[in-house]
Image (spheres, rainbow, N blue to C red):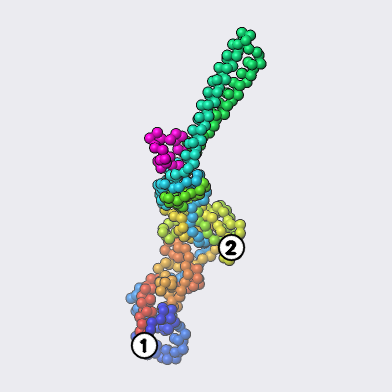
Amino acid sequence: MRYGWMMAVLLLAGCTKEAPKPEAAKAEAKAPAEAAKTPGEVRLDAAMVKSGNIISVEVDKRSEPLVLRVNGRLTVNEDRTWHVDSFVDGRVQQMHVNVGDRVSAGQVVARLHSHEVHEARSEYQRAKTELAKTRSQQSFAQRTRDRLQRLYQLKAASLEQTEVAESALRDAASAVKNAEIEVERTRVHLVEFLDVPAEDHPDHKPGEFIHEEDMVPVKTRNGGVVTKRDTSVGAALKAADEVLQVSDLSTVWMMAALPEELLGKVRVGMSAAVRVQAYPDEVFAGRIARLGDQLDAETRTAPVRIVLANPGQRLRPEMYGAAEIAAGGTAEALYMPQGALQDMNGQAVVFVDRGEGRYAVRPVRTGRTQGELVEVLEGLAAGERVVSRGGFVLKSQMFKSSLAEE
């Protein structure tokens, strides 16, 4: 049965099976317990070290600017996101866009069949009829007033009759003005609010309602990308129901969780460098826009919002990212060559050079990279020497020994 690599390391006491020299054999005979105390160690003679081109370097401690690291996910910029709603009750007859489509300001994205269109047109026609009626009454009042004025001049009508006719004309003019206002109100409701023609199309037959010019268009107020769609053809909507969401993705937000102990080191306006898995070698510049006012009771973290420029709109909502925040000041950090890292069953390890051909495998946890160097967060101490070249030879020797022992 084969064990995991760590079990193999623990069982491994040496990888070479060469016949020992007489003096070496005596040393091993005197201290067999010492060899048993060094599990996870690969031993090579000088010839194998040379042939394997194994080179070791010292882990270096440096003073670096203090950088805080937080993880989070990308979301849309809510300040640049708009919800496109239905402003009437109706049924969706047409949908013209899907999630991911780019739209421009004022673009028609859907059309609704709504009884409000027919009711508004009926109201408009009633207002026009009333206007015609009041204008006719005004015309009659005008003729009556003019006739009574002539009769009054001929002493055939009284002053009172003339004044009554004058008052009736003023009332008729006021009624006309009110009727004109009502006609304009109902017309504006149709043309500007519902965005349909005020008059029904002359070619439409009675009872025909499903015509494009009779449907209420749903338009975007701003341009962007459709990031959410909440309805489909045939759906019944109420006024204020959301049809879709449009976002300007030229900037995005990163919502990160800041540990409680780091709150005092972060403030609004600080810069942040963000990396995402899709573009591991690229840094996106951001700025802290807001710190949360309340901690999460379980995680003891506060939300922090980072605004990121999104050139080319390559950053997508729901991506995961890691942000480095320059907090000011300096901190000491350990660095080693990236070539020292080896992978064993998904675990990052290095070979520590103990001298005299002895190399111990050790798990490490790494941080950021700087050129060919990588930061060591856990697993090593300053001054220790690690194999920067030839680590694969040591790993092969270790697995050979593991297989031989099994």
Q: Is residue 150 above or below residue 48?
A: above
Query: Whole-Å distance between the Cαs marked 2 and 1?
Result: 63 Å
Residue pointed to by mark 1: 20
What residue sits 44% from the left and 34% below the top? 199
Q: Are marks 2 and 1 in contact (CB under 8 Å)?
A: no
In the rendered image, residue 375 lying in the magenta stretch gets the answer no
Residue 210 forms part of the magenta stretch: yes
Write down the region rendered in magenta. 194-218
Please give left or right for residue 178 compared with residue 17 in the image. right
Residue at far left of view: 51
Kind of residue indicated by mark 2: Asp
Which of 379/371 is in front? Answer: 379
Q: Which residue is mark 2?
A: 296
Residue 160, quarter of the rendered image: top right
Residue 331: give x, y in percent of width and height: 54, 63
Indicate which label's residue lies in the foreground, 2 or 1.
2
Q: What SS does tag 1 mark?
A: loop
Residue name at image x 41 percent, y 79 percent: 4
Q: Name the residue located 59 percent from the left edge and 25 percent from the top edge.
A: 174
**Residue pushed farthest top?**
154
Q: Quadrant of the N terminus?
A: bottom left
Instruction: Please indicate whether residue 191 sits to the left or right of residue 16 in the image.
Output: right
Which circle's residue, 2 or 1, is located before the other in the chain?
A: 1
Q: Is residue 67 visible?
A: no
Residue 9 — which label?
none
Q: Residue furthest right?
A: 160
